[in-house]
Image (cartoon, grey):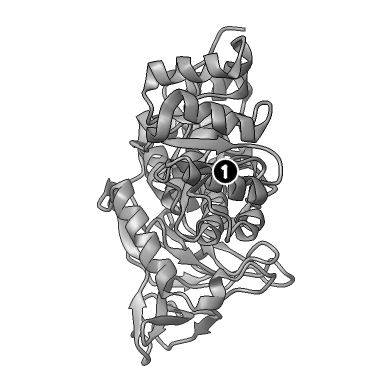
Amino acid sequence: MAHLDPSTALLTDRYELTMLDAALQDGRGARPAIFEVFARRLPAGRRYGVVAGTGRVLDAIRDFRFDADVLGWLDDAGVVSTGTLAWLADYRFRGDVHGYPEGEVYVPQSPVLTVTASFAEAVLLETVVLSILNHDSAIASAASRMYAAARGRGLFEFGGRRANEQAAVAAARAAYVAGFDGTSNLEAGRRFGLPTFGTSAHAFTLLHDTEEEAFAAQVAALGPGTTLLVDTFDTEQGLRTALEVAGTDLGAVRIDSGDLAAEAVRARKLLDDAGATGTRIVLSGDLDEYRLAELADAPADAFGVGTSVVTGSGAPTAGFVFKLVARADAPGAPWRPVAKAGGTKATIGGRKRAWRSVRDGVATAEVLRAWDGPPPRDPARAVQVDVIREGEVVHRPTIEEIRDHHRRAIAELPPEALDLTPGGPVLPTLHEETTSEGALT
């Protein structure tokens, strides 16, 4: 089979296109529609989530096009009718998107993204939007907990080899949003401007006849400020050899195995006794937020985290859904709230504006009101921002601005938000009905 370039437009489920086809044929595809992205619940034990991936969503919407090859495949596969193929050939999203700024905290029912357009334009985006936000927000939510557990010490993302090659790049970005200092993934560095870290693995030491030769080769290439991996054979002897080769100007040592807390204590004493008081200690090896918390008193300067931050074990899905909450019979007609009834998947109709109640600098609740209703009476800040207006991106913060926003959002939460013991959402979600048009139902 010939190689085919991937198409953003086909990063979707077939039913999005069959719904579109039917809606265009019966004339209702042009009806104005409002979809909201929200999570019904947080993963078990989580107290908050972190929105991440919005920047990648904007790229996906920009690139969402149906070229001749894609249209030809859809035609050959009989996915949609000839009339819909013609409509898709001219597709470009021309609607509005509002949402939580990337890096913001969310809780159950938070409308993290609101898409307003014709039903036909908006419904096509469901799968690609969810695939990005669910993945990146899961990573950022896990990374944020790890950042809190690290208590200000360095954090490096080393998980690329534990994930799909493209997911690994996105994961590195999401971890950086939530506070990690950088990544080992070079494509993430190139694509998103992230700091990259890494020097050598055990294989490099084993390549040489002795550990001393390996360290000497690395120092010769990278200078004494490099990080030497000292636990290939015997950690204490590895530390002594590292000092013999690099001297007291050695930048850092990394320990990847054993009782990390005890090894860090022994390493710090040995380094200090030798006068290498400025040599940093980096710990790695199957770390997650719980292990980081256990290492709180260890004399470590930084940690390398891999598997737990990029896989489901440490980053359970955010659980976002993309649901129709309002529609109008025609452009300019009044909005009508719509909702799915019954069961755990029931939804709340009407377009919602989110407010974060804040007292004395501490967030107390997530307040959802009708979009065109008044603000809450208690002190609160509006959470959502304009992201896309009439098809044009109007909100594109830098990665550093996103990190800063996340720091502010976390600093606003009550202290129990950072508790790693199981617990429910740190902020209650309050749905406040109003009498304005499009009220919550």
Residue at screen point 43% across, 77% down: 438
Left/right placement of residue 116 relative to residue 6 reads: left
Residue 305, given in percent of the width and then of the height, sits at 57, 43
**What amino acid type is highlighted by mark number 1?**
Ala
Residue 251, given in percent of the width and then of the height, sits at 41, 35
Residue at screen point 42% across, 81% down: 362
The residue carrying mark 1 is: 267
Q: Residue furthest right?
A: 343
**Near-viewer residue (390 or 289):** 289
Q: How packed is label 1: few (under 14 Cα within 10 Å), some, or many (20 or more)?
A: many
Whether residue 318 can be seen here: yes
Residue 103, given in percent of the width and then of the height, sits at 41, 57
To which quarter of the image does residue 167 belong? top right
Secondary structure category for the residue under label 1: helix
In the rendered view, tell whether residue 178 sits above or below residue 379: above
Left/right placement of residue 213 relative to residue 113 reads: right
**Near-viewer residue (43 or 54):** 43
Left/right placement of residue 44 relative to residue 165 reads: right
Residue 421, given in percent of the width and then of the height, sits at 68, 70
Left/right placement of residue 219 relative to residue 441 reads: left
